[in-house]
Image: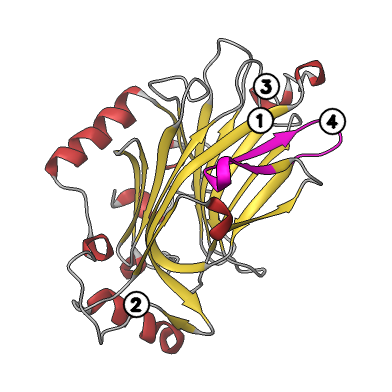
Amino acid sequence: MASSSAPFMFLALTLLTSFLSLTAADLSQDFDITWGDGRGKMANNGDLLSLSLDKASGSGFQSKNEFLFGKIDMQLKLVSGNSAGTVTAYYLSSKGSAWDEIDFEFLGNLSGDPYILHTNVFCQGKGNREQQFYLWFDPAADFHTYSILWNPQRIIFSVDGTPIREFKNSESIGVAFPKNQPMRIYSSLWNADDWATRGGLVKTDWSQAPFTASYRNFKADACIWSSGASSCTSSSSTTSNSWLSQELDTANQDRLKWVQKNYMIYNYCTDAKRFPQGLPPECKTS
């Protein structure tokens, strides 16, 4: 692992880094609808992408590009009304049996009950790092921005610019960190009523179908991986690469604490019953 990671550690150390900034007015330039037999659609000249779910099938899309580090924003408007049993997943993932993944999953609920925002980080096929939150607004009433900052030092999940979770690189204490495998952006809307709402007690009400989630205003300041090479190099400089070494300042650390105090409903790092042999090592450093 050490030899294969060396080229990528260089990215973390260099100060002269170039990157490609993608701002998609036309989402069809950056995404392909990959399944759903017509249930995924582009509208308004590509300004709007929607996924739908009915009893026969859900739908999904993926990015045309792969990324190795980036700051990625997307606005989502979730399934409205009785969304119980549905899951809208928006995530980064590599391929293979030892994949890396950075997850937003939105677990639907009965009308009037809050969505649960489920986050997770997988590295080399190992996850079990769940943190779950309620949101301080109705995510089905309007569009909101969901962001992933992924650089060699940390992963920061944010909602409308407010950080809700930070997963730091803890390789120094033996915790794997996703830094070697390029990942695509994926999203899907699917039926998960065997577990999504109250542990599967509440089932999907198919009389409410089709269920629809919408997407717009994608932006990625990112290192694009293509043909075995990164678009980020040491040969070019840019003044807009601050995300590559970005960390939470004092104000954002305070905002993170506010969210976790008031809206976090599950944290694997405090679930001693789940880890009777001891909490994962990264939990002891956070």
Residue flagged by tag 4: what amino acid is it? Answer: Lys
Location of mark 3 (residue): 84
Q: Secondary structure at mark 1?
A: strand
Q: Amino acid at mark 2?
A: Cys
In x, y percent, where is residue 23? Answer: 40, 55
| Amino acid type, label 3 | Ala
Is 119 displayed left or right of 201 in the figure? left
**How far is the residue under mark 4 from the one under mark 2?**
43 Å
Label 3 packing within 10 angstroms: few (<14), some (14-19), many (20+): many
Residue 266 or 189: which is nearer the viewer? 189
Residue annotated with mark 2: 232
- CA gap between label 4 and label 3 equals 14 Å
For disc 1, the marked residue is: 212
Vertical placement of 151 versus 286: above or below?
A: below
Mark 3 and mark 1: Cα distance apart in space: 13 Å
Q: Secondary structure at mark 2?
A: loop
**Is residue 149 rendered to the left or right of residue 249?**
right
Queried whether the magenta region covers residue 54, the answer comes back as: yes
Give the residue displayed 30% in from the left and 26% down from the top.
Answer: 261
Residue 55 badge? 4
In the image as oriented, which residue stretches furthest toward the left? 250
Position of residue 138 relative to residue 166, above or below, is: above
Q: Which residues are magenta?
A: 41-58
Badge 4 local density, few (<14 within 10 Å), some, or many (20+)? some
| Label 4: element kind | loop
Q: Amino acid at mark 1?
A: Thr
Residue at screen point 34% across, 77% down = 232
Q: Residue furthest top?
A: 112
Q: Earlier in the sequence, mark 1 or mark 2?
A: 1
Q: CA distance from mark 3 to mark 2?
A: 42 Å
